[in-house]
Image: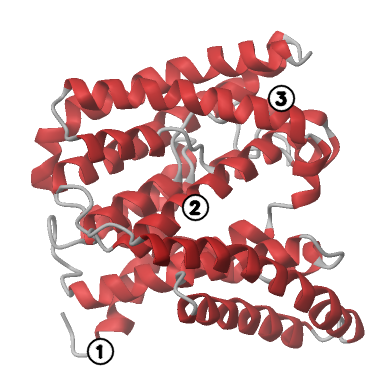
Amino acid sequence: MPDDAIVYTIFLIFTGAAVFATLALFARQALLVAYILLGVLFGPWCLGLVTDPAVIRNISDIGIIFLLFLLGLNLQPQDLVHLVRKTTLVTLGSSLVFFLIAASLALFFGYNLTEVLLLGAVATFSSTIIGLKLLPTTVLHHQRMGEIIISVLLLQDLIAIVLLLVLGASGGGGLPVFRLILLIASLPAMVVFALVVERWLLTPLIRRFDTIREYVFLLAIGWCLGLAELARAVGLSHEIGAFIAGISLASGPVAIFVAESLKPLRDFFLVMFFFSIGAGFDISMLEKVLFPAVLIGGLLLAAKPLVFRWLLGRTGENAATGFEIGFRLGQMSEFSLLVAVLALEQGVIGRDAAYLIQVSTVLTFLVSTYVIVLRYPTPIAVSEALRRD
């Protein structure tokens, strides 16, 4: 690798991403799948073009922070409040079923109790990125299906954040009771602080200077990184602080404006984050985990439409709506990847379990995306009749 490793790595990522994104669009796949595969190809376990673990790690850390900030920014709590009873029952009920499916299979394949529980937990999440990216804007903002999907995803993401909180604080050695109490108290305190600052400081400033896009951009980034550092200082994590920063802005009247201003940054760090996931993947582990990954991913993809149809049917939705929501939420999540990486780093799970989660997640990304673009309206649908922005 050249002396200027960061510039060289960014060159490889974005030049390669342009090529792989083109291929992915022709194959009707979500672009994040292309970025992961590009990382695998260029990483130390394949071509070896990117071999410096420190560079990959730095890219991943920055990418995770901004990814969670922008995820939070696109999830508005008022959608959850509007359908809280229905989506809570549906989300918790479906999560229990998916947990049992994945945990039972993990137990069958001989993983230990901690790994079984974690594998079950990550199977309960669906991809916010794929779910929202493949949903036409007209459905996302103006139809009941969009409201239900957003509400389910928000609840799932909140559960995932709690899981990341526990993993990040455990360090593989368990959580002392006193420290756990402090962490539980810190989380709502951070949320309240963020909402107060957003209402009385950020929103007035953005409204006053909203014509100066550079200022809005800097204010949003400063808020993200500032809250990330504050979260770290009180014993949480950068990622949780960034997510809270995004959620706090999402609850205000300027959320759409800020999100539009940050779209280029979102895309930039999405590429870098998912590339780093692929670059850190050890190809030699694939043989060990491929069969259980296919089984877990396949059962989840088959079960989710049926489970969502039944649960949503119990709340009054028709079967067609339940089926479509199940297919759109049929994949595992980017949070599953985050949990796998963090749990492995903290020594909570072994390499086999971590790679099983990653392979299962990528497989469900591939299959779910292809099914959605074949059957339902999306911005990249196979049929022109289904292609809607």
Give the label, 3 or 1, closer to the camera: 1
Taking the spot 39% from the left edge, 45% from the top edge, the residue there is 336
The CA span between labels 1 and 2 is 38 Å
Residue 164 image point, x, y percent: 42, 55
Q: Residue at x 40, y 56 (%)?
A: 166
Q: Secondary structure at mark 3?
A: helix
User: From the image, which quarter does the N terminus lie in?
Assistant: bottom left
Q: How many dots with numbers?
A: 3
What residue occupies the far right of the structure in this picture? 208
Residue behind mark 1:
4
Among the 4 quarters of the image, the one containing residue 52: bottom left
Local packing at callout 3 (Cα closer than 10 Å; few below 14, some 14-19, many 20+) is few
Query: Residue at point 79% right, 62% down?
Result: 256
Q: Describe residue 280's horizontal placement relative to residue 311 as left or right.
A: left
Q: Tag 2's secondary structure?
A: helix
Looking at the image, is 348 positioned above or below residue 184?
Answer: above
Identified by mark 1, the residue type is Asp
Q: CA distance from mark 3 to mark 1?
A: 48 Å
Compare marks 3 and 1 and give the one earlier in the sequence: 1
Type of residue at label 2? Answer: Val
Q: Residues within 10 Å of mark 1 (few under 14, many from 20)?
A: few
Q: Which residue is mark 2?
A: 162
Q: According to the image, label 3 marks what residue?
A: 385
Q: How is the image coloured?
A: secondary structure
165 is higher (above) or lower (below) than 80 = below
Q: Amino acid at mark 3?
A: Ala
Residue 263 in view here: no
Give the percent coordinates (x, y) of residue 335: 44, 49
The kind of secondary structure element at disc 1 is loop
- In three-dimensional space, the C-alpha distance between marks 2 and 3, rounded to whole angstroms, equals 41 Å
- Horizontal side, residue 79 vs residue 183: left or right: right
